[in-house]
């Protein structure tokens, strides 16, 4: 049975159990039925004798004869009345004549019949009692009930048993088939559904129609498959995010190598010309100072690149509850002096705002945005900063960026022509770092023209 499926196994097991039960029941019937039959007849004969003696008590001899005759015919028994030591017989069925010694009790274990033979006492049942008549005389009453021989009863039972056994087996066969189909149907449905789930079909689901163990198992399978799909979607999303980050890292490295290569080439040219004393480069003191400045710019650029990478690595670590409004106050204090040198002021409108994040990450984002607002804002303008539980917004007055500039403003080392001229010392990775940190945290943001300036918004919800 190892290669059989669930339904044939269940069917064979159930029909086997039913067949064994049917055979056992019929064996008990064949063995015990004659005994039950004989006991029932004995109880019936005893009850008939009690009824008869009750009707005969206190009656005259003639009335006793009439009552006995009617009773014998009605109950199909033979009755013997012993009156004044004379036996009077009343037959309800044709039977043997019992000869007894007058005045003596009958031994029911051995019954003598007219031809002198002895028979199995189980072929007849003899009950004996006594009653007084109307005149006070003691009357002996004997009741003989006919019983089919035990052997005949067994033969009759043996004749009927094959038919009852065959009928029982047919009913058991039909019941086992229906029962096996009913029991295995949810298991077969579950096997079909799980096979579909193995192929990762999105709509696969087991129909739960009950609250029993099968229903609970089906519900658990559905929940497990749903969790699996959620995990797959999360992995797909994470894989896309990682792929995007990898592409951004490659683009960043390419841009960084390009940005570093240009000032290095210029520095090499200056040094070679100074070494060869060519033209204006004979003034070594002037160009050595420019070379040192160029090296400082390269060092600053390298430091910005390294710092942006380390901050990005720590962006989602050591998170805790932060007061954004307090961080804003700290950053503004750092840039107040720089803003004053350009005649700029801050208009701050903040509410107590708490989020869960890495402190260095959020402070780096706010610092970059405030720094850009101060450096690129118009002289004498006002930088507006608002913050609440929903968003952080920073506005500065400046020439709004064009659509083409906005498409590249978050690219690493991107600088517009105007910005390049005004801030040659800028590394060009500030907004790229902000974008990278906010994307890692999953915060929404946008940088758009607003009136006569630009507005950067970070949404917390």
Image (cartoon, grey):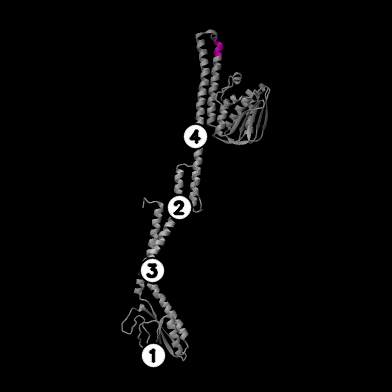
Up/down of 105 relative to 449, above or below: below
Instruction: Give me the disc on residue 390.
Output: none
Q: Secondary structure at mark 4?
A: helix
Mark 4 or 3, which is nearer the eye? 3
Report whether residue 245 is seen: yes
Whichever of labels 3 and 1 marks the residue nearer the N terminus, that label is 3
Which residue range is magenta in the image?
283-289
Asked if the residue under mark 3 is in contact with the one under mark 2, i.e. CB atoms within 8 Å, the reply is: no
Disc 1 target residue: 86
Give left or right: position of 292 versus 337.
left
Give left or right: position of 394 versus 19.
right
Label 1, label 4: how many angstroms apart (C-alpha)? Answer: 117 Å
Asked if the residue under mark 4 is in contact with the one under mark 1, i.e. CB atoms within 8 Å, the reply is: no
Up/down of 200 relative to 152, above or below: above
Q: Secondary structure at mark 1?
A: strand
Which residue is located at x 45 percent, y 42 percent?
Answer: 199
Instruction: Give me the disc on residue 185.
Output: 2
């Amino acid at each position: 049975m190892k290669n059989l499926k669930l339904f044939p196994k269940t069917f064979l097991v159930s029909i086997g159990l039913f067949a064994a039960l049917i055979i056992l029941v019929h064996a008990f019937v064949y063995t015990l039925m004659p005994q039950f039959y004989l006991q029932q007849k004995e109880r019936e004969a005893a009850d008939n004798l009690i009824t008869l003696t009750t009707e005969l008590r206190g009656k005259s001899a003639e009335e006793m004869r009439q009552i006995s005759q009617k009773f014998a015919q009605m109950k199909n028994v033979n009755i013997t009345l012993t009156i004044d030591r004379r036996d009077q017989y009343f037959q309800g069925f044709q039977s043997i004549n019992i000869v007894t010694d007058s005045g003596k009790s009958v031994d029911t274990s051995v019954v003598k019949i007219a031809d002198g033979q002895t028979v199995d006492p189980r072929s007849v049942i003899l009950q004996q009692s006594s009653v007084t008549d109307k005149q006070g005389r003691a009357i002996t009453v004997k009741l003989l009930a006919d019983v089919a021989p035990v052997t005949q009863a067994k033969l009759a039972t043996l004749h009927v048993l094959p038919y009852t056994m065959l009928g029982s087996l047919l009913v058991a066969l039909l019941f086992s088939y229906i029962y096996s189909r009913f029991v295995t149907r949810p298991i077969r449905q579950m096997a079909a559904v799980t096979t579909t789930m193995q192929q990762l079909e999105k709509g696969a689901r087991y129909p739960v129609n009950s609250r029993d163990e099968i229903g609970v198992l089906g519900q658990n399978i559905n929940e497990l498959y749903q969790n699996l799909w959620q995990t797959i979607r999360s992995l797909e999303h994470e894989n896309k995010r990682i792929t995007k980050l990898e592409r951004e890292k490659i683009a960043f490295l390419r841009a960084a190598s390009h940005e570093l290569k240009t000032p290095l080439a210029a520095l090499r040219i200056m040094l070679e010309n100074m070494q060869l004393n060519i033209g204006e480069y004979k003034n070594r003191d002037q160009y050595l100072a420019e070379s040192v400045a160029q090296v400082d710019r390269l060092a600053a650029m390298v430091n910005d690149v390294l710092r942006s990478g380390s901050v990005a690595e720590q962006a989602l670590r050591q998170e805790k509850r932060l007061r954004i409004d307090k961080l804003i106050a700290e950053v503004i204090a750092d840039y107040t002096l720089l803003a004053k040198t350009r005649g700029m002021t801050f208009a701050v409108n903040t509410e107590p705002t708490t989020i869960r994040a890495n402190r260095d990450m959020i402070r780096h984002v706010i610092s970059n945005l405030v720094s850009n607002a101060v450096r690129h804002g118009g002289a004498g303008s006002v930088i507006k900063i608002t913050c609440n539980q929903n968003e952080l917004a920073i506005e500065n007055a400046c020439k709004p960026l064009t659509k083409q500039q906005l498409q590249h403003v978050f690219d690493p080392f991107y600088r517009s022509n105007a910005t390049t001229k005004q801030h040659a010392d800028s590394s060009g990775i500030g907004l790229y770092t902000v974008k990278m940190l906010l994307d890692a945290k999953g915060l929404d943001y946008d940088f758009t023209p607003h009136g006569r300036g630009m507005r950067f918004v970070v949404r917390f919800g």
